[in-house]
Amino acid sequence: MNRSGQRGQVIVLFAAMLVVLVGVVSLVVDLGQMYVVRRNLQNSADEAALVGSSKLPDVGAARTAAQASAQANTPAGTSVQVNIPPSSGPYSGAGYSDGAIEVILSQNVTHLYAVLLGNSSSTVRASAVAVLRPYGGGPMAITGLKEDDSKTVGMGGSSDAQVNGDVWSNSGVYSGGTSDLTVSGTIFAVDGLSGDTTNITASDIQYPSWPIKDPLRFTPTPPKPSGCDPDPKKWDNDIPKYKGSGWQVVSPGCYKSITVGSSTRYMFVKGVYYVSGDVKLQGDLVGVASTGENADEAFALSEPSSAHPWGGVCFYLTDTKASFSINSQARVKLAATDEYWKRILIWMVDGSGPSGGVKLNGGGDTRLMGTIYAPKTDVSLAGNYTYGGTNLPLLEGAVVANTVGLGGTSDVVVSYNSDYAAEWPYIGVLVR
């Protein structure tokens, strides 16, 4: 064969190889693009199904919420289909006509390179199904949301903890040191128990296969008190300075910080308190319904009454570095209500910074009635309220937090109380 013939064969072979190479490259690039689109669609479908399930059994509200969530989190032109009940599978029957929701998302993806091979586009599809499940049927006193952490709910030190109600952990429940954890209800621990498990006692222990989403994440933000500047930098630096005698009145508002110093006495009028920094309680504090209420009578009570409801009060902390603390010398009597705000007493919007979190070291005269809601940060509870020689709960209501630590050097009692716990009788759980 002459040289020109060989060159011709090489050219033909190179052309054929080039076509194959272009095909492989186009396939890799376009498959990668489709993978990214599919992942984003799946995340959006999951969120939309959970958002919709939070509105069940109101089918209309669930459908509207799911569609709005999907449209807000997907590109224009994405097809959104919401089925209640799901179109197929184990949750498609009549028994789930108002208890399960399916979201199907479809997006047309234009190929970048495969078009050269005659394939201009493909349809990517993702679906999710969420159902309402009772979290166990019992009163959920403590909920730890952090996953992959053996100490999402944990004990430590030499003190004991008693929880009157159920405990849920998206990961583990831990007992360390010489402390005992006694739970009157059921412990739900996705990743089981750890530490000295012989120190953990409950009426029942279950190991769910599914972590839960934050059950309060759809709670509406409390209204900002009137007169608050939109710019947190212009909020009041702190509450009024203590004048040295009697009870100092504090009204709802927006503050850069709130400090109740030792040997001071403050009465907080019912309402919402926006705080961009820290809340430090070291003296006497009681919630009152009005400035004319007898603070001495309210403070002397072991629990709220119709005449002295201890508020309701909601502390709404907005900053990443914000913290809320009560030291062991403080004497605090506070309660949340439906009006102020959805039974949430302490709401940490973030608090995930290194100095953030909720640390309650109650002494003999601290009693809190409401829900502590800190989904992105840690809550530490220690101490009891002692009345007539009896230890009463430091907190009556519920805790929903990233992690929950109990005890330290003093025993602690936490009790579920339906009058003060933010309600979430059912949760939406992804099942497909």
Image (cartoon, rainbow, N blue to C red):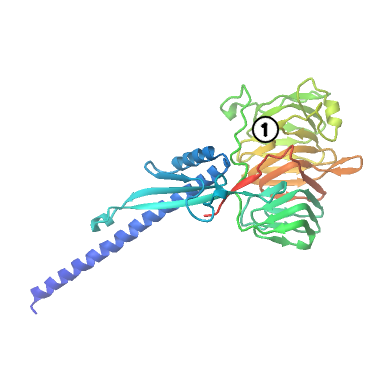
Q: Residue furthest front?
A: 94
Q: Position of residue 33 (x, y in %)?
A: 37, 54
Q: Residue furthest top?
A: 292
Front residue (pair 299, 158)? 299
Q: Residue flagged by tag 1: what amino acid is it?
A: Trp
* Residue at the spot 22% in from the left edge and 65% down from the top edge: 18
Q: Is residue 347 left or right of residue 36?
A: right
Q: Position of residue 192 (x, y in %)?
A: 68, 60
* Residue at the spot 85% in from the left edge and 32% down from the top edge: 301
* Quadrant housing the N terminus: bottom left
Instruction: Estimate how packed mark 1 is, as few (under 14), some (14 to 19) or many (20 or more) residues with alpha carbons within 10 Å.
Output: many
Front residue (pair 190, 331)? 190
* Residue at the spot 71% in from the left edge and 24% down from the top edge: 251
Hey, which quadrant is residue 258 in on the image?
top right
One can see residue 333 in this view: yes
Q: Is residue 23 left or right of residue 43?
A: left
Q: Is residue 226 above or below residue 164?
A: above
Q: Is residue 199 left or right of residue 108?
A: right
Q: Is residue 340 above or below residue 174?
A: above
Q: Secondary structure at mark 1?
A: loop
Q: Which residue is mark 1?
A: 341
Q: Is residue 12 above or below residue 218?
A: below
